[in-house]
Image (cartoon, helix red, strand yellow):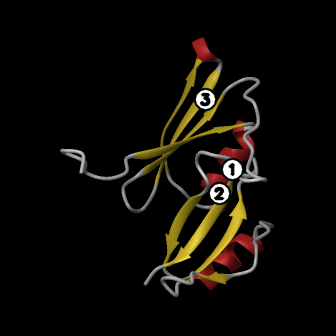
Amino acid sequence: MLPGLKGLHHVALIVSDYQTSKAFYTQVLGLPVLAEHFRAERHSWKLDLSLPCGARLELFSFPSAPARLSYPEACGLRHLAFEVSDLDKALDHLQSRGVATEAVRVDEVTGRRFCFFADPDGLPLELYQAG
């Protein structure tokens, strides 16, 4: 193991529409804002969001950022998975806010239930039922 490795600190996402993604991650998913900065030299917003585990999600806006392929699956980041204590309640919450979700599946190795949905840019997100 890498000496001194303590865990995941953050995941950074570049979004196409900053205000839409900010609303999705803060209002739909309910992630608290830690900091928000406009970086004039880059014409870019940076939003730091807090996850309950202590890790962060960073949203960036950049003018004319190229789209990322999610389908068909491309090399690189596949999806973000969020652990939830009650998958059904979490899905009800998303669906009541107009978020389309895929069918619930069961992990064939762990026996845990999970479900995929997407953020405003089509990035696959997963909800994974805690043990």
- The tag earlier along the polypeptide, 3 or 1, is 1
Q: Position of residue 27 (x, y in %)?
A: 65, 57
Q: Secondary structure at mark 1?
A: helix
Q: Position of residue 116 (x, y in %)?
A: 68, 69
- Label 1: how many Cα within 10 Å (few below 14, some 14–19, many 20+): some
**Residue nearest the viewer, comparing 33 with 112:** 112
- At x 68% / y 50%, what residue is drawn? 23
Q: Residue furthest top?
A: 41
Which label sits in the foreground, 2 or 3? 3
Marks 2 and 3, Cα distance to the nearest angstrom? Answer: 18 Å
Q: Which mark is residue 23?
A: 1
- Which residue is labeled 3 in the image? 45
Q: What number of labels is visible?
A: 3
Q: Residue furthest bottom?
A: 111
Q: Is residue 110 left or right of residue 72?
A: left
- Which residue is labeled 2 in the image? 27
**Residue nearest the viewer, comparing 112 with 41:** 112
User: Relative to residue 110, is residue 52 depicted above or below?
Assistant: above
Q: Position of residue 31 (x, y in %)?
A: 54, 56
The amino acid type of the residue labelled 1 equals Ala
Marks 3 and 1, Cα distance to the nearest angstrom? Answer: 14 Å
- The tag earlier along the polypeptide, 2 or 3, is 2
**Residue nearest the viewer, comparing 17 with 107:** 107
Q: Secondary structure at mark 3?
A: strand
Q: Is mark 2 in CB contact (under 8 Å) with mark 1?
A: yes
Marks 2 and 1, Cα distance to the nearest angstrom? Answer: 5 Å
The amino acid type of the residue labelled 3 equals Trp
Q: Which mark is residue 122?
A: none
- At x 42% / y 62%, what residue is drawn? 52
Q: Quadrant of residue 86?
A: bottom right
Q: Position of residue 76 (x, y in %)?
A: 59, 45
Q: Secondary structure at mark 2?
A: helix
